[in-house]
Amino acid sequence: MLWRPYYPPPITASQKAIQYFFAILSILIIGKLITIIPVMDRLQLAGTYKAAQIVWLGAKLSALVLFYYFARATITAIPNNGSLLPFIRNITGPLTILVIVIIGQELLWQLLEPFVQTAGKKIYYSLAIIVIIAISIWLVFRAYQSALYLSGTGQKIVKYISKIRYSQYKACTDCGHQIKNDAKFCSQCGLKILDHVNCSECGQLVSVSENFCQHCGAKATLTGS
């Protein structure tokens, strides 16, 4: 029997995102576990850093790189339909870059700090601030461009809230005034509100929202409870 190579099924974007997420967790957990080994605190590298610091810094930088690929897979997995999801999809890219730059510049400074003088520190942070502001402007611009997607979502939210609000009220059968569902009397005309009435044919209780008696089929009439 000839050997046949196994070709795994293609991986979806959501599956890739899950893989990257667990890879990030694994790197951070393993890196932290390595740093608590006693010898890692005693071992000096280049006379400046402890081995534990280098390992933990490397773990965080590796996790940051994987976070970029995780975000890309997540963006691809977000469906481009509806109204809210396209908005989230469009702003996730610059938002991801902003997070990476903010965290990455701090990690990079931890590596460079022992070798940089005061003037170099000012230059470094000035450049970092300029880059962060530029990316923030890009994020705001993308959000502005994608704001039209939210118009449909806003309308749906308003309709949903209105539906909830009006579902708590009903019309008085005498004057038509809107009263709460649990009201015993109409606040406009004083009519006693009946939740159920007696069927004029069989005498069974029938809900006021029903037009016919479910017991005998007769047309429901307000004969009192």
Image (spheres, rainbow, N blue to C red):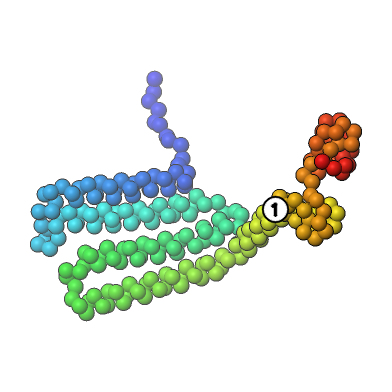
- Residue 52's image quarter? bottom left
Q: Residue at x 44, y 51 (%)?
A: 73
Counting every numbered tag in the picture gives 1
The answer to whether residue 15 is seen in the rendering is: yes
Residue 141 rendering spot, x and y as whole percentages: 51, 70
The quadrant where residue 165 appears = bottom right
Say if 144 sits above or below 4 in the image.
below
Residue 192 placement (x, y as % from top left): 80, 51
Residue at x-position 86% and y-position 36%: 199
Residue 157, compared with residue 125, is above or below; it is above
Whether 177 is drawn above or below 135: the answer is above
Q: Nearer the viewer, residue 18 or 42?
A: 42
Quarter of the image with the C terminus in it: top right
Q: Nearer the viewer, residue 189 or 117?
A: 189
Residue farthest bottom in this picture: 119
Q: Amino acid at mark 1?
A: Gln
Q: Is residue 156 at least partly visible in the picture?
A: no
Question: To which residue does mark 1 refer?
Answer: 168
Q: Viewer-proximal residue, 56 or 72?
A: 56
Q: Under tag 1, what secondary structure?
A: loop
Image point (82%, 33%), residue name = 204
> For residue 166, which quarter of the picture?
bottom right
Circle 1 Cα neighbour tier, 10 Å, few/some/many (<14 / 14–19 / ≥20): few
Q: Residue at x 42, y 48 (%)?
A: 17
Side of 156 relative to 124 (left or right):
right
